[in-house]
Image (cartoon, rainbow, N blue to C red):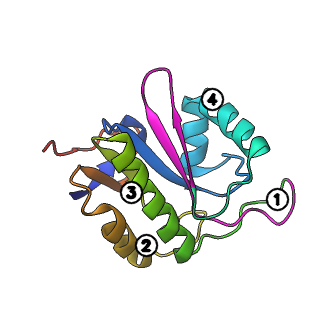
Amino acid sequence: MLHEVTGDILLSKAQAIAHGVSPNDHFNQGLALSLRERWPAMYKDFRHFEKQETPAPGSIWAWMGSGGQRLVSLFTQEPGAGHGDHSGKASLVHVGHALKALNHFVVAEQISSLALPRLATGVGGLDWKDVRPLVTRHLGDLGIPVFIYTTYVKAQQAEEPVP
């Protein structure tokens, strides 16, 4: 059940929050920066993961904080060309693969609700009208509330319908 909402995704009551990143992302802008500031341990663990693994675009990385919040990083973008370079652009293929992996994660982990922004439309550079159908295809039949934060309003809690 997809629900488009307006508000601050950091105030979501969803069990998990998903967001788009690139391999070797520095979490220095947009939602990623807000997540890094709110959960610095997540960013530290992300950096450790990336030093141990080589995440591919289209894959995911999941983190759970000590308070139970789950964050899922979707690798929707290409990595920067070199160490320290800005992230590359997203592609619809990477978004589709990452959403498919997210679907499997949600089912396997029995996630009861999910929140995500308009994936890959900020730094990723994609158009929401092209990304939205992928979200519908991969997350629309999960049988859980999926809150899509289409409009960001700082410090405003969205009205997330409860099933």
Q: Which residues are magenta?
A: 60-83
Q: Which residue is mark 1?
A: 85
Q: Is residue 77 above or below residue 72?
A: below
Separation of residues labelled 4 and 1 (CA atoms): 22 Å
Question: In the current view of this chain or complex, which residue is farthest to the front?
Answer: 108
Label 4 Cα crowd, 10 Å radius (few <14 / some 14-19 / many 20+): few
Q: Which residue is mark 3?
A: 103
Question: In the current view of this chain or complex, which residue is farthest to the top?
Answer: 66
Assess whether residue 41 is covered by the magenta stretch. Answer: no
**Disc 4 residue type (three-letter):** Pro
Assess whether residue 67 is covered by the magenta stretch. Answer: yes
Counting from the top left corner in percent of width and height, residue 66 is at: 49, 20
Separation of residues labelled 1 and 3 (CA atoms): 30 Å
Tell me the element at label 4. helix
Q: Which residue is mark 2?
A: 131
**Disc 3 residue type (three-letter):** Asn
